[in-house]
Amino acid sequence: MELREISDCCYYFCGAVNIGYIHKDGKGLLIDSGIDKGTAKKILNILKGYNLPIDYVFLTHAHTDHYGGASFLQKQQKVKLHAPRLEAAIMEHPILEPIYLWNGAMPIKQLRNKFLEGEPVIIDGFIHEGRHEVGPFRFEAVHLPGHSYSQMGIIIGEILYAADSYFGPKVLAKHKVPFIVDADATIHSLEKLQSLVFRGALPGHGDYEADISETIQANINCHTHIKQFLLNSIIMSPNGISMEVLLGKMFDYYGLKAREIGQWLLFRTSFTAYITSLIENGDIAISINGHTPWLKGESP
Ligand SMILES: [Zn+2]
C-alpha cells in the first residue's frame, strides 16, 4: 500500500481496495478505511510518516473491505465517521450482512468473519445526495446504489471517488459476475457516472483514470451480458426452470468457483438481483412448482 498523489489536495492509498485521502487546511479526510485494524494501522503509519492527519472518515458503503478498519480509527484517533444512512444502519449492526446473505435467518458461524461482518461503529453524520461541508471539506455526494443498497461516491477537488459503483477492467475479468444487490440500479448508476463532470475517477477496486468512459461501458456490457444469458436460459426452457438449476448454469457458463459458502452466497445474491430485474421488467414470471421457486419466460 502506498500513498499516491492525484492533485495538490487529493490522494489515495493504492491497493486491492483503494482508499481516498484529502488534505485541506491542516485537516485530513479519509474515504473508506480498509478491512480491519491492521489496514487502518498501516494507513495511520504512512500518514504519520508524511505528517498528515486524519480527522474525518467518509464510509462509502457497508462492505467490510471498505469500513472494517473504521472502528479502530474511531477508538484510537477519535475521528468523526460519516456514511449514507442505510449503509450506516449495517455498519452500526454488522451482523445484518451475514443475516441477509443467509436468507434472513440467524447466520452460521462460518459467515461471521471479517470479510462479511466488520467491527461495529457509531456513525456521527449521515451523508445524503448533494452538497456537504464537513470541517474544511466541501464535496458533492453522488448516490450510486446497485452494488450496495445506498452507496455514495463523492466528488471533491474535481476528483470522483466512485466507491464500488464500477470496477476496473482487470477486476471485472477476475470476478466475472460482480457483486450487486440491484441490477437496474447498478446500470442506472453507471449511466449516471457517464453524465458527471470530473477531472478523474478512482474506483474502490481498479486504477485511477482521467477518462472512465470505456471502463464504464465495459461494466454496463458485463451486466447486460449476464442478464441476457439468464433470460435466454429461461426462455430456452419451455416449461420453465428452477432457480437452483439456473444458478448452477450461471456458475458453469461463467466458470465461477466458490471455495466456501460465503463466496457462494455472494454469487447467489448477484444472481437474485438479475432475476429481480427480469421479473420486475415483465420478462419472466416466478411461481412455485412442487416445492421449488420456478422461473418461466412471459409470452410477449
Ligand atoms: Zn463493495
Image: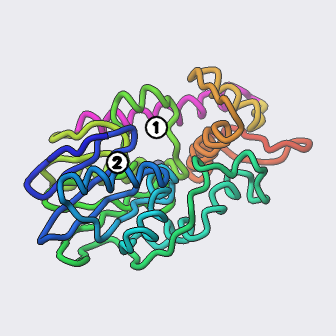
The residues colored magenta run: 213-238
The reply to whether residue 172 is visible in this rendering is yes
Question: Dot 1: what SS?
Answer: helix
Where residue 23 sits in the image (x, y, percent)? 17, 63
Q: Which residue is mark 1?
A: 223
Image point 69% across, 34% down: which residue? 260
In the image, residue 222 lies in the stretch drawn in magenta: yes
179 or 81: nearer the viewer: 81
Query: Considering only vertical position in the picture, is 92 above or below 66?
Result: below
Where residue 147 sits in the image (x, y, percent)? 47, 50
- Are the two marked residues, 2 and 1, in contact with CB atoms closer than 8 angstroms? yes
* Label 2 CA crowd tier, 10 Å (few <14, some 14–19, many 20+): many
Q: Is residue 44 left or right of residue 178?
A: left
Q: Is residue 113 left or right of residue 36?
A: right
Image point 16% across, 55% down: which residue? 10
Query: Considering only vertical position in the picture, is 221 above or below 116?
Result: above
Q: State the image quarter where residue 261 is shown.
A: top right
Disc on res. 256 = none
Structural distance between the alpha carbons of marks 2 and 1: 10 Å
The reply to whether residue 162 is visible in this rendering is no
Q: State the image quarter where residue 110 is shown.
A: top right
Q: Which residue is mark 2?
A: 190
Q: Residue furthest right?
A: 290
Image point 32% across, 40% down: which residue? 1
